Amino acid sequence: MSRIDDAMRTVAREAFLPEKQKGSAGFDIALPIGGGSTCSQPTTVRTMLELLDPVPGNNVLDVGSGSGWTTAILAALIREGGTQDGTVTEAVTGVELLVEMVDRSQGTLDALGVTNARVLHADESVLGYPDGAPYDRILVSADARGSVPQELVDQLAPGGVLVCPVDGVMTVVRKPVDPGQDVQASQYGLYRFVPLVSRRDRP
């Protein structure tokens, strides 16, 4: 079993779902969680995490964290990180626009004892969370229009990886260690997500 399979089995999807959706947690479908948001299909989450390849010690940003399920899985995948004195740092930061979703997902993380992740209310004027940058990995669970937003690429550390659907196509961006080299982007199939709200979408 892969690290990702193990983490997904350890972090119960049911705990992050509204009461009326808990009975459907085991189905491989996206489930509504309120406010027009969904908890993504497990096989889609697995694919995105495989492409992202988070490893212990990474600093990770989860954009559009929704229910907090992917945030918790990411926290499990990088859990061996932290400072040299053994204390655990907030190595995964989720950002979400819906206040009620932030409160619910952070409450679930707290209840489960997840200490290396947090969910913050996203600033509507800023995409991502620049205050926590640079990030080794950025996961975007919403569909960008036209291209991966440059604001998020700018928040990647050299050698970092960003996974984001763009116009329905799963896209992986790799930022070179050498600043003189071009950012590399690859595409990996069609997926459906709620739209990513960014500054370029606002008047």
Image (tube, grey):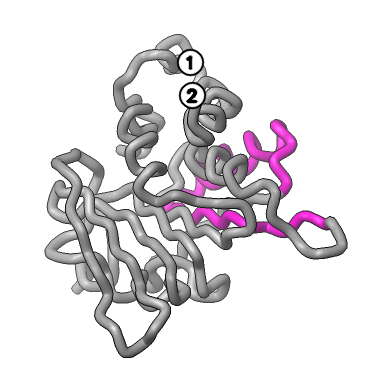
Name the secondary structure under disc 1.
helix
Q: Amino acid type of disc 1?
A: Lys
Q: For the point 73% across and 46% down, which residue is it?
A: 115
| Quadrant of the rendered image containing residue 48 | top left
Q: For the point 55% across and 51% down, which residue is it?
A: 55
Q: How many marks?
A: 2
The disc at residue 203 is: none
Count residues near mark 2 (Cα–Cα under 10 Å), then give few for <14, some for 14-19, many for 20+: some
Is 32 above or below relative to 196? above
| Image coordinates for residue 136, horizontal then vertical, percent | 50, 65
Q: Of residues 91 and 196, which is closer to you in this image? A: 91
Q: Is residue 78 left or right of residue 83?
A: left
Q: Amino acid type of disc 2?
A: Pro
The disc at residue 18 is: 2
Count residues near mark 1 (Cα–Cα under 10 Å), then give few for <14, some for 14-19, many for 20+: some
Q: For the point 55% across and 75% down, which residue is it?
A: 131
Q: Which residues make up the magenta segment?
A: 87-115
Q: Of residues 163 and 143, which is closer to you in this image? A: 163
Q: For the point 52% across and 73% down, which residue is it?
A: 133
Are discs 1 and 2 less than 8 Å apart at CB?
yes
**Mark 1 to mark 2 CA distance (whole Å):** 6 Å
| Image coordinates for residue 74, horizontal then vertical, percent | 54, 45
Quarter of the image for the C terminus: give it: bottom left
Name the secondary structure under disc 2.
loop
Q: Which residue is mark 1?
A: 22
| Image coordinates for residue 150, horizontal then vertical, percent | 28, 75
100 within the magenta span? yes
Is 30 above or below relative to 57? above
| Image coordinates for residue 194, horizontal then vertical, percent | 25, 44
